[in-house]
């Protein structure tokens, strides 16, 4: 089963419309897709209709921004009821503050000699309430300050560099409650990206399980093959299911839809409940 359970559309920081993401996924051979925009459910209806038309299975998803200790972690919710009031209210709270943060990011970049960042990023955000570092990265690349969006995240927008503004996102237990109450399964996204020590990762996985977490992403566009093995092992050791998702944001911006290796056969796929 070619399952891709993590990708983005213009409802958050993706470059393609929800329907375009779905049609591209179908063309790439994806058989089961979840759209997982950041803190936002507004792309799901269009995506679901497009999936029906394209004849592929579709699961409603979301990727929630969470502050855990001093780091930002992302929790993917899969199979959520997109009309659930608690989930919608929670996400609305998480979204608030993005525009003010973006203004501050623009001020910092201006001090570093790059004017117009706020306006530039806002102009690239189809959904202005969801303006994100990705839109700033695209702006920096488009105005020639960096060679690529990847370089934008090397020289700007990350802790210690101009344009990084810390933000308080949701609490882990709250995000899990919204997902589980909305009937979904919670997946810890791209655990290899957080730069946690082995001990801190064990703490995070323990807390995540204790509040109702189901799975971790093992095969993702953010992991190296070594990390597939590392996090596959951690999934088994902690009794968690495993997920696979490209984290597609747009053509030529990281991993393609449906193109990553399959999960190790010893792992329990998080999607078994939707594919049988
Ligand atoms: P924000 O939620 O505004 O902090 O933006 C986070 C988004 O920035 C993530 O969802 C990614 O799409 C993107 N991002 C963060 N770090 C990197 C990176 N090192 N390389 C590429 N994209 C990144
Ligand atoms: Mn993103
Ligand atoms: Mn993420
Ligand atoms: Mn993502």
Image (cartoon, rainbow, N blue to C red):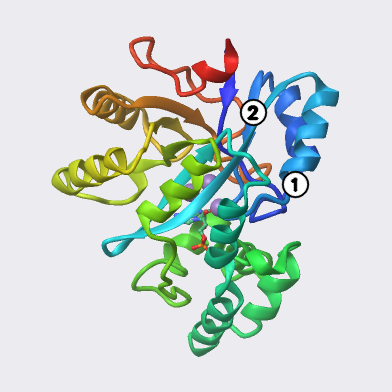
Q: Is residue 25 left or right of residue 86?
A: right
Question: Disc 2 or disc 1, which is closer to the eye?
Answer: 2
The quadrant of the image that shows the C terminus is top right
State the residue at coordinates (43%, 61%).
170
Q: Which residue lies under the disc numbered 2?
A: 33
Relative to the observer, which residue lies in front, 44 or 167? 44
Quadrant of res 243: top left
User: What's the CA distance linking mark 2 and mark 1?
Assistant: 15 Å
Judge from the rendering whether residue 32 lies leftward or rightward of residue 203; answer left or right.
Answer: right
Identify the element where label 1 is drawn: loop
- Across and down, in percent, residue 147 comes to 57, 60
Which circle's residue, 2 or 1, is located before the other in the chain?
A: 1
**What crowding class fits label 1: few (fewer than 14 Cα within 10 Å), some (14-19), or many (20 or more)?**
some
Q: Residue drawn 36% across and 38% down?
A: 212
Front residue (pair 196, 75): 75
Q: Which residue is mark 1?
A: 16
Up the image or down, 25 lies above or below 39; here it is above
Could you tell me which quadrant the N terminus lies in?
top right
Seen from this angle, which residue lies furthest bottom?
A: 111
Q: Secondary structure at mark 2?
A: strand
Front in this rendered view, residue 183 or 97 = 183
The x, y position of residue 158, in whole percent, is 41, 66
């Amino acid at each position: 089963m070619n399952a891709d359970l993590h990708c983005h559309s213009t409802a958050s920081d993706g470059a393609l419309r929800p329907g375009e993401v779905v049609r591209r996924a179908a063309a790439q051979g994806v058989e089961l897709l979840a759209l997982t925009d950041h803190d936002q459910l507004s792309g799901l209806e269009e995506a679901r209709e497009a999936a029906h038309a394209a004849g592929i299975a579709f699961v409603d998803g979301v990727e929630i921004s969470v502050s855990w200790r001093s780091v930002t972690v992302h929790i993917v919710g899969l199979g959520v009821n997109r009309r659930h009031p608690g989930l919608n209210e929670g996400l609305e709270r998480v979204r608030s503050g993005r525009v003010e943060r973006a203004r501050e990011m623009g001020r910092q970049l201006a001090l570093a000699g790059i004017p117009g960042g706020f306006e530039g990023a806002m102009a690239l955000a189809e959904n202005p309430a969801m303006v994100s570092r990705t839109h700033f990265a695209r702006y920096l690349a488009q105005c020639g300050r960096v060679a690529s969006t990847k370089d934008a995240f090397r020289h700007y927008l990350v802790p210690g560099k101009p344009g990084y503004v810390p933000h308080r996102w949701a609490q882990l237990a709250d995000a899990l409650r919204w997902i589980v109450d909305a009937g979904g399964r919670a997946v810890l996204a791209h655990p290899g990206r957080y730069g946690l020590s082995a001990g801190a990762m064990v703490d995070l996985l323990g807390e995540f399980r204790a509040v109702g977490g189901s799975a971790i992403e093992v095969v993702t566009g953010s992991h190296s093959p070594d990390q597939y093995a590392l996090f596959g092992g951690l999934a088994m050791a902690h009794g968690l299911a495993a997920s696979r998702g490209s984290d597609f944001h747009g053509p030529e911006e990281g991993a393609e839809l449906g193109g990553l290796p399959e999960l190790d056969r010893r792992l329990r796929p998080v999607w078994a409940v939707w594919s049988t």
